[in-house]
Image (cartoon, helix red, strand yellow):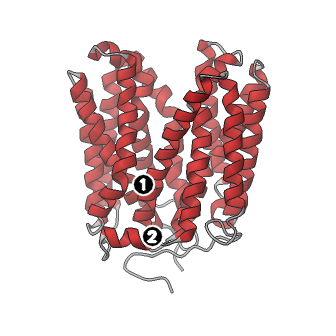
Amino acid sequence: MPSRSLMQPPLLLLSAGGFLAVATEVLPIGLLPLMAADLGVSGSAIGLLVSAYAAVVVFASIPLNSWTSKLPRKPLLVGLLIGYGASNLVVCLADSYAVALTGRLLAGACHALFFAVLFGYASRLAPRGRLGGAVALVNAGNAVAIAGGVPLSTWLGATVGWRWAFACAAGLAFLLALGAARLMPPSPGSSLSGGAQLRVVLREKSLHRVIAAVIVLVTAQFALYTFITPLLLESGFTRDTVGLALLAYGAAGVLGLSLLARFTDSHLRRGLLVSVAVMAAAVVLIALLGGTPGWTLVLVVVWGIFFGPVPSYVQTAAMNSAPSQPETVSAIHNSTFNIGISAGAFIGAQTVLVAPPSGIGYVSAALMLVALVVVLTGHKDGFPPATTLNFRRFGRKNP
């Protein structure tokens, strides 16, 4: 009987790859003033290094996956990791803003394809019946990057200079490429063309519901999270203590993932419903209790804990919707998730024009309740009461 353990070196390497990808995405956030001063541009221009990256992910995920669908997975994964290393090295050595932007666009192109390859590999490496656990393990790397990426890059920038943060990311990428070349088992590309895969996947009504839930839920999450710093300042935190509150939120997400992701394989629907309901209650209370930093911090931590497993829940639900095409599903999910991030930031920005930052809590909670209804009514498609995992293993069909 095959092992049901998730602690396999290839899966751990994929988790480290997720950490690298998300850390690369958020690196400029903590280094913004240092990069702006060194490259001679405004802070908003450095912010573009993040938004341009996300835009590439939104528009390139599905086409890049289609174009590479028949390629063997192992050399593709190694090549993407080398691409991350090269892109971070370009930014590290950039002597102008244009060169730095070029490096970020290259990194965005790698990111657009990377998670399709990453989760496709995870679906094949996962022990039978443990797809959700494998997805959660990969997402653990993402969660750690969100929790520690910005504080760590900020510390590196202040201590040894912002370029060293990108140099460290480049070094990690090259090391992971070597590890992938050694540890990852071969995995063939698909026999179907990218267009045929996309048509197969888009016929799945279950996936339509998951996509709708992801867009609404991620929009709700990032409407408030994008403006969490001004919200914390409004609640009585100082500029010196905001960083600690943000670190607490990130750590809470990692804790929530470690505690609650176990339900991904056994009670995905119930776990997601509980998480969304608790998050909605937390963000409403954040809005109601503005000006009380102690309670605000408690609620922010609760919010972080219950959001922690949500990316694993929705990723697994999407992959269960079309288990024969995990890469194409993951590419759609990657694009969808980033659409939600952009939409959330836009809605949050429009809300703060007419209300204080805490007021976004009401908008965010309303959207979360819409997502709750989408999940609740999806008991026949998308979010069934029991999760049945049917996915391919290397070179074999499941019996």
Left/right placement of residue 289 relative to residue 308 reads right
Residue pointed to by mark 2: 201
Is residue 93 among the parts visible in the rendering?
no
- Give the residue drawn at x 65%, y 17%: 233
Q: Amino acid under label 2?
A: Val
From the top left corner, tell me how far across and down residue 334 is, in percent. 45, 52
Rendered view: 204 above or below 101: below
**Element at label 1:** helix
Residue neighbourhood size for the residue with mark 1, other residues' Cα within 10 Å, grouped as few (<14), some (14–19), many (≥20): many
Rendered view: 372 above or below 394: above
Q: Quadrant of residue 184?
A: bottom left
Which quadrant of the rendered structure holds the N terminus? bottom right
Left/right placement of residue 272 relative to residue 156 reads right
Task: Tell me the number on the disc at residue 14.
Answer: 1
Residue neighbourhood size for the residue with mark 2, other residues' Cα within 10 Å, grouped as few (<14), some (14–19), many (≥20): many
Q: Amino acid under label 1?
A: Leu
